[in-house]
Amino acid sequence: MPNLWVDADACPRAARDIIVRAAERTHTPTRFVANHQIPLPASKWVKPMTVASGFDAADNEIVDRLASGDLIITSDLPLAMEALEKGAQVMTTRGETLDRNNIRARVQMRDFMETLRASGEHTGGPKGYSDSDRREFANALDRWLAQQR
């Protein structure tokens, strides 16, 4: 079974709880990687991995350890692009699949929005993590895990 990697620095607690339950239920090796301590239950399947603080330290650790076919859960688009290049699969905490067909457009939009913000434009932030987002994520993760059996 492939490993499940979580970019835990910005992972919502509700998504973290869904991931832990799914990993336990399916016996999926899961690593939560962050530059700070992540509270997780004691588990044979779910482990925290704390990396040194620094720009992209957690991202670099994930990319270094990824294997083709692994799943990474992240909303970090540059990290997603690197993971896809290594043959990993990528899902956001909202259950969206990022792949070679949509990643470049998403990165370009992110860069465009960053340019707008740098010019003083107020673009707002991401919407809050809703019950609908939780359901979509849980369903998408369950579908991925079922495909791995």
Image (cartoon, rainbow, N blue to C red):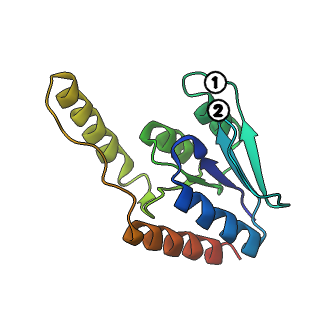
- 87 w.r.t. 15: above or below: above
- 98 w.r.t. 38: above or below: below
Front-most of 8 and 78? 8
The quadrant where residue 144 appears: bottom right
**Residue furthest to the right:** 44
Q: Of helix, strand and loop, which one carries label 1?
A: loop
Coordinates of residue 63 in the picture (x, y in percent):
63, 38
Q: Which of the numbered marks, if any, corresponds to residue 35?
A: 2
Q: Are marks 2 and 1 in contact (CB under 8 Å)?
A: yes
- Say few, some or many: other residues with alpha carbon within 10 Å of mark 1 (under 14 / 14 to 19 / 20 or more): few
Front-most of 127 and 32? 127
Amino acid identity at mark 2: Asn
Q: Residue at x 62, y 34 (%)?
A: 58
Q: Residue at x 67, y 34 (%)?
A: 61
Coordinates of residue 86 in the picture (x, y in percent):
60, 44
Q: Which residue is mark 1?
A: 53
